[in-house]
Amino acid sequence: MKKLLLPFLVLLFACSEEDPALEFPLKAEEKFSSEIFFSEYIEGTSFNKALEIVNLTGITIDLEAEAYSLKKQQNGSGEWMSELMLTGEIVHNDIFVISNESATIPEIIEQADQLKTGSPLDFNGNDPIGLFKDGELIDIIGTFNDSEEFAKDQTLRRKKAITEPSKTYNSQDWEVLKQDTVNDLGKY
Ligand SMILES: [Ca+2]
Ligand SMILES: [Ca+2]
């Protein structure tokens, strides 16, 4: 029996390595988020700008079908502008990256699920960015109608304790990293 069991265990281990989902089956008590939300913001040098969204809702989100979009408020004043409709899907426990197409840091381009030149992916630290669903704001980075430089030359990473979007920006919910930090882009 022992001779048969060992290859079986090796096989089982090899399989579980290939598919992380097998190692961490969903527990019945696991709490899902009610919505997708921003998980990272990169305000780097030049056009090195990116936004990351995470899906912890337990279901696949079709961004286009549900009309998710991004908008920017230029320098914290005026109307929301430069609406960018998001396209594609995010499966549960996955992330979606939107990057400025003119970025020069390779990871920003490599990790991108959607690329855009210019606005709204041209924020420079004082431009609130909103995540919208069918025209309704669901999550925000920065404070609407506030021209303060809240994240100039920084990477912001949402703390793991935060599992829901928020229509009010709270800097306490974000970890601040130095300019051009991209090592967690495309990961959660
Ligand atoms: Ca600005
Ligand atoms: Ca990340």
Image (spheres, rainbow, N blue to C red):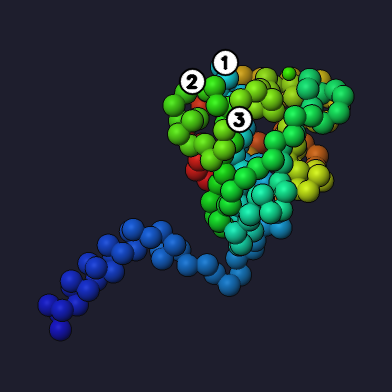
Q: Nearer the viewer, mark 2 or mark 3?
A: 3
- Which comes before the other along the chain, label 1 or label 3? 1
> Mark 1 belongs to which amino acid?
Ser
Q: What is the crowding at mark 2: few (fewer than 14 residues within 10 Å), some, or many (at least 20)?
A: some
Q: Determine which residue is flagged by label 2.
A: 104
Question: Quarter of the picture for ligand 1?
Answer: top right
Q: Residue at x 52, y 67 (%)?
A: 26
The amino acid at mark 3 is Lys
Taking the view exactly as shown, the residue that stands out farthest to the top is: 46
Residue hosting label 3:
116
Circle 1 sits on which residue?
46
Alpha carbon of mark 1 to alpha carbon of mark 3: how far?
Answer: 15 Å
Q: Earlier in the sequence, mark 2 or mark 3?
A: 2
On residue 149, which mark appears?
A: none
Q: Is residue 46 above or below residue 131?
A: above
Farthest-out residue, left: 3
What's the amino acid at mark 2? Thr
Q: Residue shown at 38%/60% (left/top)?
A: 19
Residue 168: x and y in percent read 80, 39
